[in-house]
Image: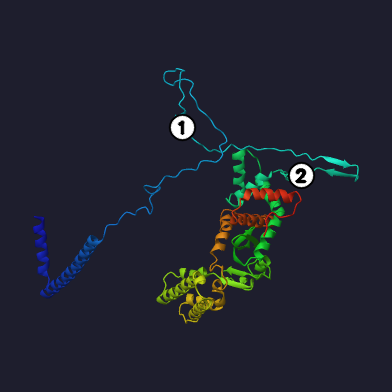
Amino acid sequence: MAATNTLLENRLILQEESKDDLIDAILKLRKENEELRKENGELKEKLEKLESARIREPKKKLKKRWKKLGRPVGHPGITRPTPEVIDHVVEQRLERCPECGTATLNELPSQTEEHIQEDVIPAHVEVTKFIRYSYWCTNCKKIHQAPYHPDEVPYGHLGPNILAHTVLLKYFHGLAYSKIQSVFKELCSLKVSESGLAQALQRMAKWLQVEKEVILKALRNSPFVHGDETGWRIAGVGQWLWNFVNQKWAVYQIYRGRGRKEAKAVMSTDYQGVIISDFLTAYDKLGKRLQRCWVHLFRVFRRIRDPSPEEQLAYRKLKRLYQDAKRLDRDRGTLAPWTFLRRLQRLKDRLFDLAWTPFQSAALKRLAKRLHKSYGELFTFLEVPGVPSDNNFCERMIRPNVIFRKISFQNMSRRGADAHEVLMSVLQSLRLQARTPAPFFKAAYLKHRQGNPTPLLSC
């Protein structure tokens, strides 16, 4: 009944309208109807496309583990190797039967079960009192005192074992002095302050300076050296930590500047070897020859987020050039000398053409400028056998300092920075030579502290 009344009301309203107004309204409604039908058809087509694409889309497979755990099927198992020396043998026997309690048991030697277990003996602090007696010589009329004991640190309250392991905990494991203090307290009930540990290492580094001089001498006489630097702080003031390494030696030096003067202070002005470095100008006139790092060239392209076709083509050319150079280096022993030199000259010509290409990209213009400037310093590894083509080794060797920087405030005094230079240089050199650091630090410190300046390291 309500719907009928509504229709009657609408009919009366339309009768009041003129004929022309009704025709305009009908035409407007038809136009809106056509637009709605067209829009509806487009939406149906899109829906059909989405449904068909969803049907054709393959089901996502679950990501499998790249490698199965454990050894392959059929291979013999592996376990911890048996120690060569057994300190104690503990035998467990039965006096009575555990079920009936009788004492008449017959031992079966062929059915024994053996089990080897390794453990750490709880440590404790060992306190030693050294007494040095004095004597009057009736012949030379002088007072003579007994020498230091081989394990005695003159005027030191902490023994050499504590100091050697503090060096490892600080500069190898990267622990703060507060954590080292906790380690000693929980491990062997040793009470020592943070400042006491810091000052002890500073005194130790002072006496081990002679070992660092050996490392510097060895680096200055080596055929090639890697060089790099990273930011540092001393009491909050910006500094630079310089790193010069080769396959056997590593030296670290902290300076205020990042220029040529600081680099020459480490390697000296008459170094006759090859310096392998990035494109920092501080290394320009450091050695007799330079080898610039190829990896730093490719890092230019990593910073380009959306490379253009021009940049992609330049990257492929540079990468192909480097691959051909590495292949020529590998084939050095199988090629005749004149063939090797001819191919090397072709590589230089290709590098020259790439450096003088009129690029449009700003990044490629900077790259071309770098190639043009370092044209004679990129193929040194082909001209001098044994020289690496990149500086990755040096960056790996400087990483312990970067980790040390992230977990600490670096150094709070110049004395602390001097200790860092010496102890880190000796520690990393020992690791490069696969030598155990703790016994060396103990022996070297005792030797130098007792007045013997002869270094344990040798070039």
Disc 1 versus disc 2: nearer the observer:
1
Q: Is residue 237 visible?
A: no
Q: Can you say whether 129 is above or below 301 in the image?
A: above
Q: Look at label 1 and name its amino acid.
A: Glu
- Residue sitting at 24 percent across and 63 percent down? 53
Q: Is residue 51 left or right of residue 72?
A: left
Q: Can you say whether 388 is above or below 99 in the image?
A: below
Question: Which quarter of the rendered picture does the N terminus lie within?
Answer: bottom left
Mark 1 surroundings within 10 Å by alpha-carbon count, few (fewer than 14), some (14 through 19), many (20 or more): few
Towards the viewer: 152 or 412: 152
Q: Can you say whether 453 is above or below 298 in the image?
A: above
Q: Look at label 2 and name its amino acid.
A: Tyr
Q: Is residue 65 left or right of residue 56?
A: right
Asked which secondary structure carries label 1, the reply is loop
> Residue 62, image x and y in percent?
32, 54
Towards the viewer: 118 or 75: 75
Q: CA distance from mark 1 to mark 2?
A: 51 Å
Q: Which mark is residue 148?
A: 2
Whether residues under marks 1 and 2 lie with C-beta atoms below 8 angstroms apart, the answer is: no
> Residue 362, image x and y in percent?
48, 76
Towards the viewer: 155 or 47: 155
Q: Which residue is mark 1?
A: 113
Occupied quadrant, residue 412? bottom right
Mark 2 surroundings within 10 Å by alpha-carbon count, few (fewer than 14), some (14 through 19), many (20 or more): some
Q: Earlier in the sequence, mark 1 or mark 2?
A: 1
Question: Which quarter of the rendered picture does the C terminus lie within?
Answer: bottom right
Occupied quadrant, residue 260? bottom right
Q: Which mark is residue 385?
A: none
Q: Is residue 291 visible?
A: yes
> Residue 69, image x and y in percent?
39, 48
> Residue 353, image x and y in percent?
48, 81
